Amino acid sequence: MILDSIFYRLGDVKIDEDGLRQSLGRDVADRILQTSGFSNRFIVSPEQSIFDLGRTVIEEESLRSRIIQSDVVIVVSEFTRNLVPPPSSLLFDDFKFRNTLVLDFNRGCSGFCEALVVARQFLEFSGLKSAVIVTAECYSTMISRTNRTLAPIFSDCVAFTFLRKGNETAPLLWEAGADHSLGNNLAFDVSSSELFMNGRALVSFVKTSVVPSIERLLARNSEMGYFVCPSFFPHQGSKLVVEQLNHCLGNRGLSAAFTASDVGNTNSSSIPISLKKLVLTKRPQGEMSFLLSGFGVGLSYCNVLTKLAFDNANS
């Protein structure tokens, strides 16, 4: 696949380290900052939603025609105003699609990788030529400012990742899974109208499920020899999580950068943001191998080994 371009926008209200200390107290805030690594977070203002933010990006970046002309549009979001209609209809409320497959994925931090797997299948086997993955999440509407577990972590963000069919020289290898018995470790409590997260359980999930999955995927690749020295881009759950992945997988020659200190945990948008920051801004040409790892709410994970080509990539 050709990774054509990525556009993203964070919530319009910035909360920096001083703002966090004012909300939670200096000692608590400093302990959280040391573990999470997030010096800034961004949330939508009370009068906005994530879909308002998305429509702003579409207008300011002139993305309307590109989206309408895409063969496949996948919207990854757990946020909606009501049970019906789905997020895509709220984001594209004035669009008229013709001959475009529009899909909604109610997924969290694993959603971008899962959408990438699906998009690749359509582009490779159905004769379609272009796809766009929209990742949009707005956890701030489910979290109070004084929530010590989640308020210092999550940012609201929408990202548009544009893909095109390329001259595929290698298959996309992937491994995914979910343990829904652990779903309550990150869930919305209707009675309290608050999102709950068991941080320790999520970190444990990375070690017991995500890392073994990556190791199995790498073992498959070693037998086939498709991807040499892939660049590692995991979900930016926190500085602690990225460091744990590097520690567990260092003997495999993998090392990921922590790229989210200035933006916070943006859920399913964290991998696209990392790709834009570390790859697309350098305007690459040719083809690169990547290991992408998404994991989180569900609890679910999806790890992908793929080659992405770059042809006049945009920032």
Image (tube, grey):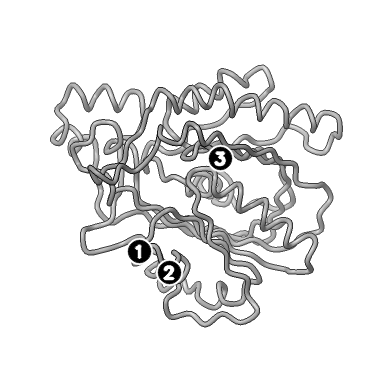
Q: Percent x, y for residue 63?
A: 50, 72
- Mark 3 and mark 1: Cα distance apart in space: 26 Å
| Residue at 54% in and 48% down | 111
* Cβ atoms under marks 2 and 1 closer than 8 Å: yes
> Number of callouts in the render?
3
Q: Secondary structure at mark 3?
A: strand
Residue 86, image x and y in percent?
Answer: 45, 65
Residue positioned most to the right: 224
Name the front one of labels 3 and 1.
1
Q: Along the line of sight, which residue is nearer the eye, 188 or 207?
A: 188
Q: Can the viewer see residue 39?
A: yes
- Against 246, residue 124 (above or below) is below
Looking at the picture, how far across and down is residue 15, in whole percent? 24, 44
Is 288 displayed left or right of 169 in the figure? Answer: left
Residue 315 in sight from this viewpoint: no
* Residue placed under numbered mark 3 in the picture: 294
Cα distance in 3D space between marks 2 and 1: 7 Å
Q: Secondary structure at mark 1?
A: loop
Residue named by callout 2: 85
When asked about the image quadrant of residue 227, the answer is: top right
Q: In the shown orientation, is residue 120 left or right of residue 103?
A: right
Above-or-below relation of 62 to 43: below
Q: Nearer the N terminus, badge 3 or badge 1? A: 1
Q: Amino acid at mark 1?
A: Asn
Residue at 45%, 73% (x, y): give it.
Answer: 92
Q: Residue 47: image x %, image y %?
A: 22, 64
Which picture quadrant has residue 73?
Answer: bottom right
Q: Mark 2 is on which residue type? A: Pro
